Amino acid sequence: MPNSTESLNPLITPTVLEVALRTDPAIRLLDVRTPAEFETAHIAGAYNVPLDTLQEHSGEIRFGVQSPIVLICHSGGRARKAEEA
């Protein structure tokens, strides 16, 4: 198990995320799925910023959050696109 958020792999399992959140509760969860998907199910405490609106929120995300950010989606594809953006 990683002992700091800096050592997390780019793709992590829910179990590893759970341990990381216990270790560093300042981690921010950014769910890049659609609002409908987010309403159906999401991790408690996650913020929903759909991938197609990410660009307009990039300033807030980049400069307003000092903690590590975990990008969340269903399969990892949108999270990877969000990371690239």
Image (cartoon, rainbow, N blue to C red):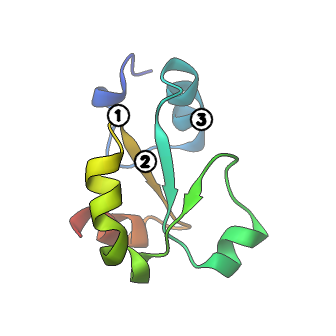
Three-letter amino acid code at the position of disc 3: Thr
- Report the Cα–Cα distance between label 2 and label 1: 10 Å
- Tell me residue 63's x, y (percent): 26, 50
Residue situated in front as seen by the camera: 2 or 25: 25
First of labels 2, 1 by sequence position: 1
The numbered mark, 1 or 3, whose residue comes first in the sequence reads 1
Q: Secondary structure at mark 2?
A: strand
The numbered dot on residue 15 is 3
Front: mark 3 or 2: 2
Residue under the point 45% across and 21% down: 1
Q: Tell me the element at label 1.
A: loop
Q: Which residue is mark 2?
A: 70
Q: Which residue is located at x 69 percent, y 80 percent?
A: 36
Mark 2: which amino acid?
Val
Left or right, 2 with respect to 38, comes to: left
The quadrant the C terminus occupies is bottom left
The label number, if any, that marks residue 8 in the structure image: 1
* Contact? badges 3 and 2 (CB < 8 Å): no
Dots 2 and 1: beta carbons under 8 Å? yes
Residue type for callout 1: Leu
**x and y, in percent, of residue 7 in the image:** 29, 28
